[in-house]
Amino acid sequence: LQSSRDIAVDTCVEILSCYRLYTSAKKSPPAQLVLPESLQLLPLLILSLRKSSLLRPALAKGLGYAQSPSPTCDDRCFQQHYAMNVSPAVATLLVHPNVYCLTSMESSDGTMYTPSPVDMKNRSMGSSDEVDYEPYIRLPHPIHPSMSCLNDDGIHLIDDGFSLYLLVGNRVSGEKRNQLFATTNSNTSHNSDCLDISTTSDFGEKVGNIIHQLRTFHESRFTYAPLVVLSDSLDSTVHSHTPTENAIESSSNNSYEGILLNLLVDDPTSHEKGYVDFLCSLHRQIRNKVMSETYAETHGGF
């Protein structure tokens, strides 16, 4: 694993060094980190890959929140196999999850939209296939997967390519929770940990639509993404009942912190730097490689 993590960084350094050496970027000041327009997010992808469960070091059993090695050998093997067989869009989610703030959505988010021929005029050539005209659910704009972007009074949806996580802040009002979760007067509950997304409120219906769109949007998503709620506590007026398509599982407080730490890949961890520090380290390696190559060419040796 350590070798794979190092290879990822070395490959990134090699690509960006070649760009610096053999393009117009060689005229840029040495103190400036220059990235090609099409690879602006490459350093972020490499850092996220190193932090993901595909390559990150396993947390030993009993250390911090881990009740067992995290990830286990079986989990890591499955995730690596899954990553090699899905589309690039889903594979990207495995290393850099999408986070949506559901409490600050625009009015059109979560509603059905059908593109018209007029909407296709600004699309690139070759993209106006029939599939482009199929209706779809509008998704909110994603935010950075960082703790600094999460609000205690907000509700956030996180998609990591495997599961969907519904993070309910501890300051979310009881009224908002009741709009989100379905309630029932039935006393014949089959599973006390199972809830449903409400289909009777406008907010609940939009959230349900977004969840359905995320589950069905990527054809290469081979598994049915379960919906897991992350919350310190659920309002006492929210009841549980027989699982349905919108059923969700509640996560215990013990694993709450661990799940968030794994999902919020923009934040520094005990084994990886933050993004800014990683860019500084990457820049030093690129500068050293460029200086070495330039010196070798100048003195006629390689």
Image: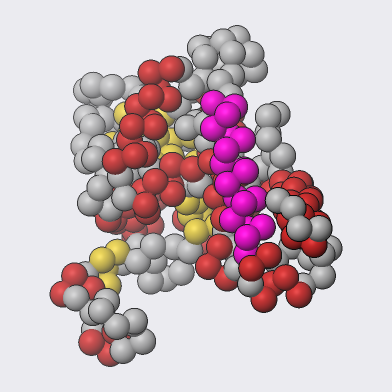
**Closer to the camera, 39 or 27?**
27
Residue drawn at point x = 23 percent, y = 87 percent: 117
Q: Position of residue 106 (x, y in %)?
A: 46, 69
Residue drawn at point x = 56 percent, y = 10 percent: 61
The N terminus lies in which quarter of the figure?
A: top right
Q: Position of residue 44 (x, y in %)?
A: 60, 51
Would you say 294 lies left or right of 212 here?
Answer: right
Q: Is residue 302 above or below residue 237?
A: below
Which residue reaches farthest front? 300
**Closer to the camera, 25 or 132?**
25
Would you say 218 lies left or right of 3 here?
Answer: left
The stretch in magenta equals: 1-20
Numbered marks: total: 0
**Closer to the camera, 77 or 233?**
77
Judge whether residue 78 is colored magenta.
no
Would you say 70 lies left or right of 77 here?
Answer: right
